Each structure stands twice: as C-alpha cells, then as structure tokens.
Image (cartoon, rainbow, N blue to C red):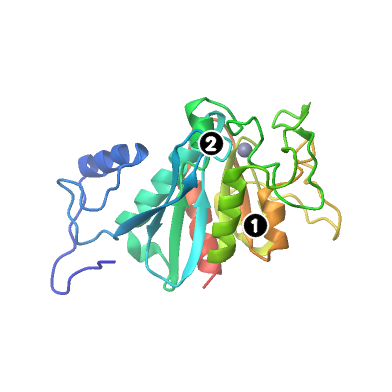
Amino acid sequence: MCGHASGVTPPRFSRRRMLQALAGGVGGVLLAGAAGLPRAARAEMTSETLGLSQGGIPVSVFWVGSGARAVVVQGAFHGGPEINTSYLAFRLRDYFAANPDQIPAGLRLGFIPEANPDGIALDSRQYLSGVDPNRNWDTPDWQSDAYDSNGVLRRGLGGPYPMSEPETRWLAEWLLALRPEAVVQYHSRGGFVLGSRELGERYSAASGYVLPPARPPGQQGTGLLPYRATGSLGRWLGLQGIPSVFVELSNYSDPEFSRNLAGLLAVLRALV
Ligand SMILES: [Zn+2]
C-alpha cells in the first residue's frame, strides 16, 4: 500500500471529487488511480475472484490495507431486496481506501459488496437454484425446509443437503483458508445486531442498533426474528471459531453509512 510520501503535503479532497469517487465506487469500479484522483493518500486496492455464481457472475473481494490479519465485510447476501447492504459495503470500502490511516495496524479489510450477484440481478433473496444463501450452511440446526425472511416456511429453501450450493462451498473453503479475525455481515431490515458477544456489544454501542440480551448456552434464537434462521453462515462461523457480527439495517433503502462506519471502526479497534 502507499502511504503519504514523506515531505509531501497530503492532498485534500474536494467535495466534488469525493462524490465522484463514491459514485464510481457503487458501480464496482476500482478507485485507486482513477482519473483525477490524487494517489498519494489512497490505499492500494486489490481484488480477487472468490468464485462464480450459479448464473456465471464472478464474486469479488476487494482488499484494502496490508495487515496480516483479515476482517471480512459482506453485503447483499440476500440479493436485490437488501441492496442497501451492497451500497453500504461499497461505501465502506471506498472510505477506507481514501482513509487508510483509519485501518488499525496489523489489519486488512476484505469487502464483498455483492455476495449474491444472481440475487441482485434477479431482485431475489435466493441463489439461482432458489436456495437461500443464509440457510444452506452445515450446522446442527440445518434443515431443508426453512423459513424465509418473511417468516414463511418454504420447501427446500435450505437446499437438498447442507453446503449443497457451489457458492456456499467456495465461500466456506475461502473462509477456512483465510481464517479472518471477524466477519461482518450486513442484512436488512431489522435495526439490530447479533453475533459474537464482545464484538456485537461494541458494534451496538457505536452504531445504536439494538443488541438483544444474551441467551443461555445452547439456546438459540434472538427474540427479534419471528422465525428460526437455520443453517446460517453466522452459526457456521461460530462452529469454526471465527467471530462474526450480523447487522440488520433498519430499512431496505438507506445504507445508514455513518452509524455503520462507527460500528465497524469500533469492531476493528476491539481486534487490536
Ligand atoms: Zn438478509
């Protein structure tokens, strides 16, 4: 990554340039080195393809920062209906690319703003197969028939067997190889935070999203969701010993950038 060159005054961003940068970022365009943007204060951004969706669309992770320990930020797992979580992940990516000094030493951030591109293209919560990305993970509570985000029990929503979907398998393989310090997942809409206790508390305190009270060990459910989310990524991450934070934005349209930036920064600072 490139920091400030010594002896060079860090460039100031005009409001117009920042808006241009944000507008470009939402479309998935890499910002580093974009025409007209000063380079010296920006972090280098790299990207890699995690795998292909069932519809053949590559799913990318964008890396900002160069620390040895990774934090993963994921948006739009539930596709088009939760598109504000994709906008949020892009905006967070672009914020940290423009402000690399906000990334605590030793960390690097991997943003997956379009975790379910088929669902974005088709305005669906599910994969092309009709399986829900967040009901397909190999957990003790996995079941083939599962509740959707509206609390309706749907046949086969969890897949024919755990990890049946190619996207689930390559994401799992990648996460197990990476072993991130934390995974922050964005969903909408609920206006609350779940996840690993300490990180969830930090996120909640900084963002203002409600954190439900702790449950006794072995008891699941949040009391906030009116249905059981079986076979979830968060549960699977917990079984692998990978901390996670699950954030439900409070509506379907606004990325609620400022409060989520505050929440994410609180989590990052808790990890160092
Ligand atoms: Zn969701």
Residue at left 26%, top 44%? 18
Q: Is residue 201 above or below residue 151?
A: below
Above-or-below relation of 241 to 248: below
Question: Residue 54 — which label?
Answer: 2
| Residue for point 51% across, 73% down | 272
Mark 2 Cα within 10 Å, few/some/many (few <14, many 20+)? some
Q: Amino acid at mark 1?
A: Gly
Q: Is residue 57 left or right of residue 174?
A: left
Residue sitting at 51 percent across and 48 percent down?
260
Could you say which quadrant of the image residue 214 lies in? bottom right
Res. 180 in view: no
Position of residue 85 relative to residue 208, above or below, is above
- Badge 1 or badge 2: first in the primary sequence: 2
Q: Is residue 163 left or right of residue 142?
A: left
Q: Residue at x 65, y 30 (%)?
A: 130
Q: Quadrant of residue 48?
A: bottom left
Residue 150 sits above or below residue 1 on the image = above
Checking the image for residue 200, the label placed there is 1
Under tag 2, what secondary structure?
Answer: loop
Residue 187 image-quadrant placement: top right
* Residue 57, label in figure: none
Residue 156 percent location from the top left of the image:
75, 32
In this orientation, does residue 112 appear?
yes
Q: Position of residue 229 (x, y in %)?
A: 75, 41
Q: Quick one: SS at disc 1?
A: helix
Tell me the kind of residue under disc 2: Gln
* Disc 1 residue lies near ligand 1 with CB under 8 A: no
Percent across and percent down for residue 206 are 55, 55
Q: Is residue 144 left or right of residue 73?
A: right
Picture mark count: 2
